[in-house]
Image: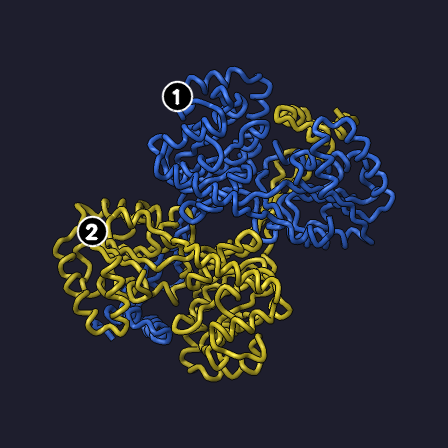
Chain colours: A yellow, B blue
Amino acid sequence: MKKEDILTRGICFDPEIERTVDEILASVRTNGDQALYEYNRRFDHADLSSLEVSQEEMQKAYKAVASKFLETLKLARKNIEDFHRRQVRSQFVITDQPGVVLGQKITPIERVGLYVPGGTAAYPSTVLMNAVPAKLAGVQEVVMVTPPNEDGSIKPEVLAAAQIAGISRVFKVGGAQAIAALCYGTKTIPRVDKITGPGNIYVATAKRRVYGMVDIDMIAGPSEILVIADETSKPAQVAADLLSQAEHDRMASAVLVTDSLKLAKEVQEELKKQLMTLPRSEIARTSMENNGKIILTDSIDEAVKISNQIAPEHLELSVQDPFRILGAVKNAGSIFLGTQVPEALGDYLAGPNHTLPTGGTARFSSPLSVDDFVKKSSFIYYTADALDKIGDHVIDFAKKEGLDGHARAISVRTKGELL
Amino acid sequence: MKKEDILTRGICFDPEIERTVDEILASVRTNGDQALYEYNRRFDHADLSSLEVSQEEMQKAYKAVASKFLETLKLARKNIEDFHRRQVRSQFVITDQPGVVLGQKITPIERVGLYVPGGTAAYPSTVLMNAVPAKLAGVQEVVMVTPPNEDGSIKPEVLAAAQIAGISRVFKVGGAQAIAALCYGTKTIPRVDKITGPGNIYVATAKRRVYGMVDIDMIAGPSEILVIADETSKPAQVAADLLSQAEHDRMASAVLVTDSLKLAKEVQEELKKQLMTLPRSEIARTSMENNGKIILTDSIDEAVKISNQIAPEHLELSVQDPFRILGAVKNAGSIFLGTQVPEALGDYLAGPNHTLPTGGTARFSSPLSVDDFVKKSSFIYYTADALDKIGDHVIDFAKKEGLDGHARAISVRTKGELL
């Protein structure tokens, strides 16, 4: 991939897919649950009698999961909670001017829908990473949608994670139709105020189409890693980290930027070696061939500059003194400090969110956080005396903008007349 | 308007306009400045020799503005700064676990583009409300685009506000072509990371189309006010407040919710009376006829519930004890407390932002704030010992998700081998 391609990468929307998605959105809006049952048959080959996962199914799934993994899920929840709790914000109030109270109020979003992909991509970590910050934000109701298997079941680990995360209801529906259901509401599935979670191109397109009627987290593109490594990095570790992104999907991108020619060559050798035994080697190889890159720089500082231009989702500072360059990093979703910190640690357990800006959007976007599940409202209180003091300025401003009605709303109070 | 229409209101996108906008976007992407000069001639009837406002033009405009209004602008800047400064957030770091450092880094967005509409809607307040929070966030470069008058000039008040707000460069271009220039960059206009500011349907559509390549503030719909008033409200004041929204445009909406039949009737009379002398009465009358409404409730608490469903951009609590019900307000962009606080105060001078969520998006969106001009990055540092402790959990998690490459990135460190 040319450097130019890295800088202009992003998600392309296919008009053909947009049309299909629009049809699905319209059909669910009109036909509700009936459309969902129909799409479940057509796309997921699942003939369901009920869209909602029952309490009995929930309990059965929880028991089916190994107790050791339940412990891992609970440890993950604890670490995610501990990190995200620090993001919870306070309301504020300003009382500096006599007779004036200004403030900012924080209110949780009322209802959130979490999309969890099906099949091999049904990740319990996704459930925790989305639901935990929503709950910490104070969201009353977090519901989940996920496509059913052909026999109508849902992966037990996903249902266990949903219970550990405190998700109230789970519905068996996926694709654009699930997004439609969350946006418009059906008899069974409640309309939500925000939809989060990853999905395939149909899900991503549907989220993009409904954005505005309902909020969305982001339009997630393929996963990315950029590793900045110096000669103190171990080639086998760097290669393993690059492949841990490359194995996600064929569109994933893994880039090494280093000031050491020796390391660059050794990593190349390691990549070949490790690919031979990696279970998902076919995917990882395609991804490395299409989007993999090793960039050689004169210095680590130059490497940071290149990384800022690329704005990667995951950035590893696999160098001797990573804290030295932390301040110079401007654009990156999540930053992994030191040779001993693989990106995979952040995917599950460390605590920070794994829902991160892709496709260069780290230039302006942030990891999913508690902030994404609240909204702010400002408030203004003035006494009549305080309004009197500032009134003429407001009237002047409004008249300059040609909005006499605005001026009158002031003058009717401060002067007792319509100007 | 039926209640149902209020609850499902929002912005409709016209496929015809989308096609036109897509053509404009493509043309600017390909032809750069040349396309901008051409569109300036075609749409704004302005034949320019330069796209950028010169230093000389800037100074001339500043001198052309009445010194009293410059003072008003500076007072507005001060109040907006004082309020938004409270929104500036700190980075945080967590060191609770031995050998573990987790944190959240805050970085300003590098370059922001501010769209300011032309003609009668060229509002200096828009300039301040967008630029001040961007500057407080630490944005290095805030540039502005605005369509030129036929003689190639820009409203002096707008240029004066730009200078007072610390905007570095102003370009004479409007419409979808201005959004394209900010998104892709041209020889003259720098590519930005985020575009904010209101605009007509072409601007809104263009912003929606480029969202993802570049960030946007929001898709702003018509302005809205909901006034909750009890019998202590003065009919002339309530009517003036309703009309101050209605005069914005024909699509604006102004709704009164009251538990007093007497007030409802008197406001209706006042509306008729005030419309007779309001300069923008034609616009305000159309807006009131299309989207105006008076809703009678049994109680003020019920009025708040209705307001939460509507999720208005501006909410006036024109009641005797507004602080009693502040906590019950869930969905509103900006809240005006008490009978003596008209919404117009918030448009200019009080301090809170006037860029607010419309079309019911206050369910999930917030006023424009300093937060909108920064992005967060998480960071993770683990010592080798700390990684050893948690390693097996991560390996287990990765294997459960079928991502052996992820497990290997851990095991190559904790066990010295690829699992």
* Amino acid type, callout 1: Ser
Residue A8 location (% of width, % of height) = 32, 47
Residue drawn at (22%, 55%), measured in percent from left and top? Answer: A293
Asked if A378 appears above or below A155 in the picture, the reply is above
Query: In terms of image quadrants, where is residue A351?
Result: bottom left
Return the chain for callout 2: A
Q: Circle 2 sits in a helix, a strand or a loop, which is it?
A: strand
Provide the residue designation for mark 2: A295
Residue drawn at (52%, 69%), measured in percent from left and top? Answer: A145
Viewer-closest of B87 and A238:
A238
Q: Are marks 1 and 2 in contact (CB under 8 Å)?
A: no
Residue B97 location (% of width, % of height) = 38, 64
Query: In terms of image quadrants, where is residue B39?
Result: top left
Viewer-closest of B253 and B77:
B253
Provide the residue designation for mark 1: B49
| Cα–Cα span, label 1 and label 2 | 43 Å
Tell me: A235 left or right of B268: left
